[in-house]
Image (spheres, grey):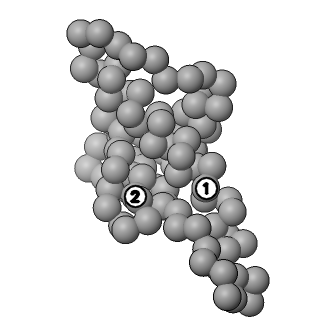
Amino acid sequence: MRKVVGLVVLVLSVAVVGSSVVPSIEAQDKSKTKGKEKDKVGTVEIYKAKDGYRFRIKNPDGKTIAIPTRGHESKDDVVKDLDEIKATLNKVKPTDVND
């Protein structure tokens, strides 16, 4: 049950950050945001760990808010997981789980 709750939190975090990552590229152009306060967004980082490739989701302040429970063999596997998480979050609403 704890794993399910952890997965839901991870998936929600990826959806929030993942949906904000693409607009952040445009927001980096200071000429477009001059005089306007741009939205703060977090980041999704892919890195090599002892057990394989992993990702971490960071909030706008740079604090890690989500990481996977296991490593993957390749970066492509990590990207596939991130895409699957985003697709799931875009299709479903969070549900309450009673322990």
Q: Position of residue 82 (x, y in %)?
A: 55, 40
Q: Position of residue 24 (x, y in %)?
A: 63, 67
Q: Is residue 85 left or right of residue 2?
A: right
CA–CA distance in space, label 2 to label 1: 12 Å
Residue at x-position 47% and y-position 36%: 12
Q: Residues within 10 Å of mark 1 (few under 14, many from 20)?
A: some
Vertical relation: 23 (above or below) 6: below
Q: Is residue 45 left or right of residue 51?
A: right
Quadrant housing the N terminus: top left
Residue at x-position 34% and y-position 50%: 65
Give the residue type at disc 2. Answer: Lys
* Residue named by callout 1: 20
Give the residue type at disc 1. Answer: Ser
The answer to whether the residues at label 2 and label 1 have Cβ atoms under 8 Å apart is no
Front-lying residue, 81 or 10: 10
Vertical relation: 60 (above or below) 1: below
Tell me the number on the disc at residue 69. Answer: none
